[in-house]
Amino acid sequence: KQWYQRRVAITAGILKAHGKSARESTVVKGYALNCTVGSQLMPKSIKNAKLACIDFSLQKSKMKLGVQVVVDDPSKLEAVRQREADITKEKIMLILNAGANVILTTGGIDDMCLKYFIEAGAMAVRRCKKEDLKRIARASGATLVASLSNLDGEESFEPAFLGAADEVVQQRICDDELILVKGTKAKASASIILRGANDIYVDEMDRSVHDSLCAVKRVIESKSVVPGGGCVEAALSIYLENFATSLGSREQLAIAEFAHAMLVIPKTLVVNAAKDSTELVAKLRAFHNASQTIEAKRQFKWIGLDLENGKCRDNKEAGVLEPEMSKVKSLKFATEAAITILRIDDMIKIYQPSKEDPNSYANAVKSGRM
């Protein structure tokens, strides 16, 4: 099976996998990585994990291009090879001595380096996505280290670079093995496993979940919600119509047209649901007019559209809510766009001056040459 994944937020991830039905999609506690441990001899679960997130490979050091080592004595050749191996070993021991027992790297780890992790009883995961490591570092409090070099020109790895988690475990979820980072100390984390029959179905589920998570994000940022289903637009339309009649100038026309334009949203919602837009929007306006003019019917201000049954209902009680921030911004941007279009009332054209030929027939006649 092939895994597809995309991250939505720092604490929530979406993974997509083929097979089974959409109802078998699950939520997993912990940040899921589409990776496995580097060796089967490594532990599959580590409690009280200390995470080291590094952005370089742990492989046998090789000479750079253009660097040559001239050896006079053949017996010293083995010492050169041993030193190449010791350079990587020193890097690994710096990380392990800092207290790390889970090493996540974006690069590779060769077999020789895996031996040191196995002997230390640590878990090493290679070929992780850099985007995933950044989020794990933020969630666990770790630092993504791109190099072990310090300001003194030496190599070091501080314990402060490590992140903390309750458990890092390799677990079979659905049809594949995943690495789960559970109980991150800095921020909570979770992953959503989406299942579906094919790519198109799973991608559509992914977009729907993404939209839902963005709506939740907006609600948290806005800290307030308003009833949905065209409730706000209908209430504003009635209020602005009543306000327009109180004005005795030409501004009344502009406000009345703005109030009429507010009904585009509820009309579009009804048309998309294949219902009678004229009847439903008229009922909705009647409810909101009563809520604003009759004190005993103030509770009608929560009335919105029920597009499943083709009627009006109390959307606050039904739980159909929208973030206030999104509603206000959409109204502001639409108004600003309309104002910008109305201000463009003149069209200016600049014509390039034509260059006259002095030897043309007309100029020759004017100059008396003909």
Image: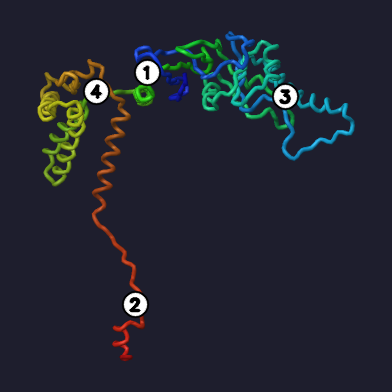
Residue bearing mark 4:
227
Residue bearing mark 3:
88
The amino acid type of the residue labelled 3 equals: Thr
Determine the CA span between mark 3 and mark 4: 61 Å
Q: Residues within 10 Å of mark 1 (few under 14, many from 20)?
A: many
The amino acid type of the residue labelled 4 equals: Pro
Residues marked 3 and 4 touching at CB (< 8 Å)? no
Name the secondary structure under disc 4.
strand
> Is 297 in front, or is 121?
121
Q: Earlier in the sequence, mark 1 or mark 4?
A: 1
Name the secondary structure under disc 3.
helix
Name the mark on residue 356. 2
Q: Residues within 10 Å of mark 2 (few under 14, many from 20)?
A: few
Determine the CA span between mark 1 and mark 2: 72 Å
Name the secondary structure under disc 1.
strand
The C terminus is located in which quarter?
bottom left
Residue bearing mark 1:
196
- In this image, 3 relative to 260: left or right? right
Name the mark on residue 267. none
Q: Earlier in the sequence, mark 1 or mark 2?
A: 1
Q: Is residue 110 visible?
A: yes
